[in-house]
Image (spheres, rainbow, N blue to C red):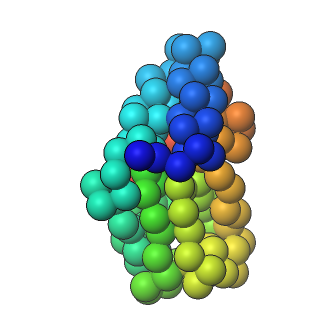
Amino acid sequence: MAAQHTVEMARRLKRASAGNGAPIWARMAEMALKPSSARRTVNVNRIARLTKASDVVAVPGKVLGTGGIGHAVTLGAFSVSRAAAAKVRGAGGSVVTIERLAEMHPAGTGVRVLG
């Protein structure tokens, strides 16, 4: 069973999806409720390869610190390792929660899902 904070996050994401007509947040809510073994794991080097400066990225899983990134991105994920957060911030980017990402981009436009 999912932890209580995960269930609450999924509820808030579903509300954000319904209120803004943004299916991306409903999909993130579904992924949050899956078992942790079914969630994605993405390394910083993959984010670097698949994005460009100023991209907004959502990862429905965990971001790990393998590799480096040379440009700023806004990263939202269910979980981010300390090393990954340091590398993203070191490149001038920011790390936020998925819920905060939904607040920043309520319609979901311009948000890339990786994982």
**In front: 64, or 56?**
64
Name the spot of residue 7 as percent of width and height, x first: 54, 38
- 55 or 37: which is nearer to us? 37
Residue 49 appears in the figure: no
Residue 81 placement: quadrant: bottom right
Compared to 89, does 16 lie above or below?
above
Find residue 46 and report its horizontal and vertical position in percent. Answer: 37, 71
Q: Work out whether 7 lies above or below 67.
A: above
Q: Is residue 19 above or below residue 29?
A: above
Residue 56 locus on image (x, y percent): 57, 50
Q: In percent of the image, x 37 and y 58: which residue is there?
A: 36
63 lies above or below 96:
below
Q: How many marks?
A: 0
User: Within the image, what quadrant is residue 94 found in?
Assistant: bottom right
Quadrant placement of the C terminus: bottom left
Q: State left or right for residue 94 relative to residue 109.
A: right
Asked whether residue 1 is in view, the answer is yes
Q: Residue furthest left?
A: 38
Left or right of 21: which side holds 74? right
Which residue is found at the position 70% from the left and 43% from the top? 100
Return the x and y of residue 31 as percentages of the image width and height.
38, 42
Q: Residue at x 63, y 29 (%)?
A: 12
> From the viewer's perspective, is 47 left or right of 111?
left
Q: Residue at x 55, y 14 (%)?
A: 18
